[in-house]
Image (spheres, grey):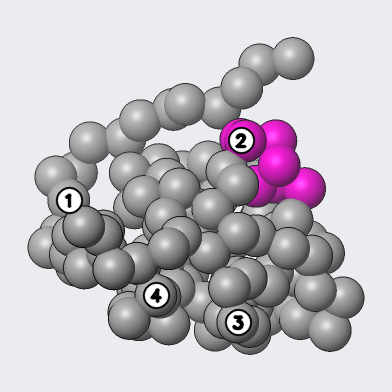
Amino acid sequence: MNKFQDLSIKLAEDRSLDQPAFGAIVRGAVLAVPPALFPVLEQYQLDTASEFAVYARMCPEAFVEDLDLSRDEVVRKTGELLGILRGHVSEKLLDKTPLPDVQYDLRVEE
């Protein structure tokens, strides 16, 4: 049985993308994210903290373009995100082993 219940993602007007971990913070059973990030997560249909963490690790280039951040910033902020999610989501998702230098582009075309 999985002891973790994934965190839902909610908008938090008091958070900023300039803060660590993309401005995300755990509040109870919710991952609160800033206004600049929330529509990007909605666009990619990322509804939970686990989905966000996996996507940020696998497809950092999507966040580079959509959030106007450098790849290094996205990688750093993703590492911070994994840190704040420890104890809230499955440890398997928090493996910080460097990924191969392969870029995936899974953006949704409208």
Against 51, residue 81 (above or below) is: below
Disc 3 target residue: 28
Q: Position of residue 53 (x, y in %)?
A: 41, 57
Residue 68 within the segment the image draws in magenta = no
Mark whose residue sits in front, 4 or 2: 4
Q: CA distance from mark 1 to mark 2?
A: 21 Å
Nearest the viewer among 55 and 99 is 55
Residue sitting at x 34%, y 67%: 4
Q: Which residues are magenta?
A: 39-45
Disc 4 target residue: 88
Nearest the viewer among 29 and 35 is 29
Disc 1 target residue: 99
Nearest the viewer among 106 and 69 is 106
Question: Could you tell me the amino acid type at mark 4?
Answer: His
Q: Main secondary structure of the magenta part?
A: helix
Mark whose residue sits in front, 4 or 1: 4
Disc 2 target residue: 44
Q: Is residue 13 left or right of residue 27?
A: right
Q: Is residue 48 left or right of residue 39?
A: left
Q: Is residue 8 visible?
A: yes
Question: Could you tell me the amino acid type at mark 3?
Answer: Gly
Mark whose residue sits in front, 1 or 2: 2
Q: Is the Cβ of the residue at disc 4 closer than 8 Å to that at disc 3? A: no
Q: Secondary structure at mark 1?
A: loop
